[in-house]
Image (cartoon, rainbow, N blue to C red):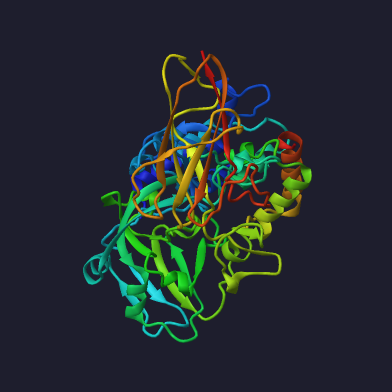
Amino acid sequence: MVDRRQFIKKASGTLAALGGLSLFQRSGLATATGAEDSTSLDALPGKKALIKKTYRPPNYETPVSYFDAPFTPNNIFFVRYHNAVIPEVKAGEWRLRIGGDAVRTPLELTLEQLRRDFKPVEIAALCLCSGNRRGLFQPHVPGVQWGSGAMGNACWRGVRLKDVLAGAGIGKSAMEVSLDGADSGVMKTTPDFIKSLPLAKALDENTLIAFEMNGEPLPHWNGFPVRLIIPGWTATYWMKHLTAVNVMSKPFDGFWMKTAYRIPKDRFQGGQFSSQETETNRPITEMVVNSLITNLVDGQTLPTAKPMEINGVAWDGGNGIEKMEVSTDGGISWHQATLKQDYGRFSWRQWHHVFVPKHPGEYRIMARATSHSGACQPNEPIPNPSGYHHNAVQKITIQVA
Amino acid sequence: MRTFILLLSFFSVTATAGESTIFLKDRPGKNQVIVKCAMCHSLDYITMHAMILDRAGWVKTVGKMINVMGAPIDNADKEIIIDYLAKNYGR
């Protein structure tokens, strides 16, 4: 799947990276301490420059300024992988296998069959990494130290997973549906990235096998040729380069379900996943209510004569946003922001607020969202061992000169 | 040496040119860290966790890489790697 020229290009890159110890020393670039900021701007093939957190596996986040738009363009959409072997799948060679011990008739589908034989569906939905803003937790917790950019809003087009599963037939014993993609670890011993869904979520009418994103084929780095879309749930379940769906009579017990992506029980709102729960924890499921200011940055200076425009986005796990409030005085008073066009309950919702600063000085801007379920962002993030669901009210300081 | 280079070119299928910009501190144990850790992932995973993990955190992380992620690291190298990470990238 990787052609020879690419292989050689990549091979030479690595020899420099791994074999070139003396090269580093000669370059004079190594500082006295040797430490480097692990974050830098870098462009993956087909993408604009994103904020690189790790090169391999690639973990890249979108600069926040790009979020000041209803949809996030494909070439700046964030990239997140767990394992480093990421084959460039060819559409004509790709197959989706439907199997498992609780399926009646195992199936194999081509991309052409998927497009031709099932009803197409379009959904606007936010794709948000469970660990978005992990880097903001204090104290820090291990894991990719994401800022606010491990998310993106897109219009996804595909077919319903339930329609595809109906073709195979679901047995009475079915409990979970597991999902596997074409990517894998470098070592055979590394657990493959496999996720599972409760049967009911797999059969939800909004759960899609998507082959288009914002009117184009999925970019390679976002799961070409097809990925799963589970609107409202965090992106860990949105399997990229989807190759296998297994209907199973037992809970899937691989590392990425049993151990990873877990949150303490009863600390967050959100759906249950009873077949995977333990006495103390459960898998992460729905996104929590959250918002982000997209046009201003902490510490920015603005001219006093002009009205201050405050723009942002707000979202939750599928209830939709009820109201968005902004404070310009550090939380003493709150003003309702205007919600912009509604693209559906799984899309983020843009909002804006205009404020006229009366005098020069420091303004402490805060933004908080409330969902239709009544859930509101907390003032502090809710601690949890893996740093998921950071949804604390954002606080930034703007200087008016 | 030839084996070493061959080994490196085997890993490289997944590596990217940008990785050559990552510098680790030039202290004892660095070679083991590069050879073993960079088999599967870029070394910015290490710099990203500098000042986040203390020695116990690095012990746990290296243990996870071996026991959960299947990294082929023997006990002698494991101790060298933990010591390097704790001393140079520890909280």
Q: Position of residue A237 (x, y in %)?
A: 48, 60
* Residue A181 shows in this picture: yes
Q: Position of residue A215 (x, y in %)?
A: 26, 50
Q: Seen from this angle, which residue lies furthest left? A: A116
Q: Position of residue A47 (x, y in %)?
A: 36, 39
Residue A240 or A63: which is nearer the viewer?
Answer: A63
Q: Residue at x 63, y 33 (%)?
A: B24
Give the number of marks. 0
**Rendered position, A108 above or below B1:** below
**Rendered position, A23 above or below B51:** above
**Rendered position, A44 above or below B14:** above
Residue A107: image quadrant is bottom left
Q: Classify residue A326 as left or right of residue B59.
A: left
Q: Residue at x 54, y 27 (%)?
A: A298
Q: Classify residue A245 as left or right of residue A281.
A: left
Residue A166 or A360: which is nearer the viewer?
Answer: A360
Q: Position of residue A124 (x, y in %)?
A: 35, 53
Residue A359 or A293: which is nearer the viewer?
Answer: A359
Question: In which quadrant will I find the N terminus of chain A?
Answer: bottom left
Q: Residue at x 29, y 49 (%)?
A: A214
* Residue A56 shows in this picture: no
